[in-house]
Image (cartoon, grey):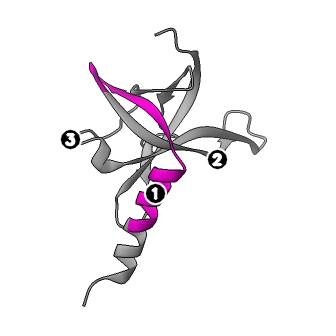
Amino acid sequence: MPDLLRQGAAWLEQMRTAHCSSPVQYRHGGDVHPVQATFGRTRYEIADEASGGGLTVGAHVWDFLILADALPGVEPEPGDLIVANGQKYEVMALGEDVRGWRWSDPYRTTYRIHTRDIGPSHD
């Protein structure tokens, strides 16, 4: 019997990419990959241990959801760039133990890549 949940999730990811995404460039090392990406956002909190007052600061990063198959042989890493809508976004880790991306689905088909806006692209 086929895995209906896996098939349904794959179909949803394909529909998201086909109908809710925009063209971007993913730059890894010297390679440029034109891919489709869906824009997102991740909120997170940082505890300020240095102040000793228990201060917590909230922030957000810009996310890009990209099918892993669209980046064959590439695992996103801090320092990679995404160029979208005339802006550059740098892949960044959210902390010492959190790399610059996570899986967006239980079947590991889509990267959710965490970035920060580093300004206009002059390419």
Which residue is found at the position 43% from the left and 51% from the top? 102
Q: Estimate the x, y position of residue 34 in percent, counting from the top left.
A: 36, 31
Instruction: Give the residue number, with chain letter if any, for mark 2.
Output: 44
The amino acid sitting under disc 1 is: Ser
Tell me if label 1 and label 3 are in contact, CB under 8 Å: no
Q: Which label sits in the foreground, 2 or 1?
A: 1
Identity of the amino acid at label 3? Gly
Which residue does the numbered mark 3 point to in the structure image? 73
Residue 116: quarter of image: top right
Q: Left of 109 or right of it: where is 13?
A: right
Give residue 1's position: percent from left, percent from top: 24, 91
Q: Alpha carbon of mark 2 to alpha carbon of mark 1: how far? A: 16 Å
Q: Quadrant of residue 63?
A: top right
Q: Which residue is mark 1?
A: 104
Amino acid type at circle 2 is: Tyr
Front one among 90 and 98: 90
In the structure shown, which secondary structural element does the residue marked by tag 1 occupy? Answer: loop
Magenta stretch: give its range: 11-32
Q: Residues within 10 Å of mark 3 (few under 14, many from 20)?
A: few
SS at circle 3: loop
- The CA span between labels 1 and 3 is 18 Å
Numbered badge on residue 68: none
Q: Position of residue 11 (x, y in %)?
A: 40, 67
Report helix, strand or loop for mark 2.
strand
In this view, the residue farthest toward the bottom is 1
